[in-house]
Amino acid sequence: MQDKLGFSIDSWSAWAPGLESPEAWRDWYSDRQELPRAEGIPDVRDLPAGMRRRLSLLGKMALRVALDAGQADTTRIVFSSRYGNVLQMLQLLQTMAVDEPISPTGFGMSVHNSLVGMLSIITKNVRSQTAIAAGSESFCMGLVEALGLLAENPHEPVMLIHCDDVLPEFYTPFQDHSVRQCALALVITSQNPAQNHLTLNFAGGRAAAGQDDPIASFLKFMIGGLDDWSWTGAQGKWSCHNHV
């Protein structure tokens, strides 16, 4: 990026097993913990029963943080995920392998943008929706997409939803062991000195990719109000500066 992209975070929500409130996340940061390896299911009892039955675990994670962050009914939405609804896709492939009929609902929910579609149904939000999958850099590219939308119309906030789950056992050879069950929603606005003033930068070039998932380090950067965040992916180095 030749120009640094500026933004503020108006509100946020995150979910991981055992970390379901801002207070729990602040304790997690204070204790310098890593994201838990445990598994869990977010509480979505406030969603309609029919909707809950259709949602995968990933869908419950995504909708939980989106609704808790607020403004999901008015913002433009960017959804990013490294693996997406891979469990549902695997179930479809296994069904095809034994020549059984495929569930139309299962197919519909396996599509990468299905979860933002479900969110729009719940919130009646008819604004733009974008789904991103970019490997290990999915969160970073989701953030770039959100900031691009913000640059087009600085007066309307954008919500970035990023979530991932560990791969099912069938895909163990391809599992990145730094990926945990985790979801994050950020409501991003134009730079607002009264909140925070952040700039995102990218320096391309060949580099040794980091051994961690960027979402954990970004959560620590955001919760702790740290000055700088950086993460190196396959395409180069991503960094964010907090102009406090």
Image: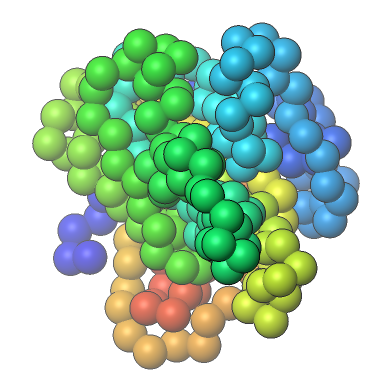
Residue visible at 67% across and 72% down in the picture: 171
- Determine whether 199 is above or below 45 in the image: below
Residue visible at 55% across and 62% down in the picture: 99
User: Which part of the image, by quadrant, shows the N terminus?
Assistant: bottom left
Q: Is residue 200 visible?
A: no
- Determine whether 72 is above or below 170 in the image: above
Q: How is the image coloured?
A: rainbow
Pinpoint residue 44: horizontal percent, then vertical percent: 69, 20
**Towards the viewer: 198 or 146:** 146
Residue visible at 41% across and 32% down in the picture: 116
User: Relative to residue 126, is residue 170 drawn left or right?
Assistant: right
User: Relative to residue 94, is residue 185 drawn left or right?
Assistant: left
Q: How many marks?
A: 0
User: Relative to residue 143, is residue 222 drawn left or right?
Assistant: right
Pinpoint residue 137: horizontal percent, then vertical percent: 45, 65
**Towards the viewer: 193 or 162:** 162
Q: Residue furthest left?
A: 152
Pinpoint residue 78: horizontal percent, then vertical percent: 35, 39
Pinpoint residue 32: horizontal percent, then vertical percent: 82, 52
Residue visible at 31% across and 78% down in the picture: 204
- Determine whether 208 is above or below 60 in the image: below
Q: Quadrant of residue 211?
A: bottom right
Q: Is residue 56 visible?
A: yes
User: Relative to residue 17, is residue 208 drawn left or right?
Assistant: left
**Towards the viewer: 94 or 173:** 94
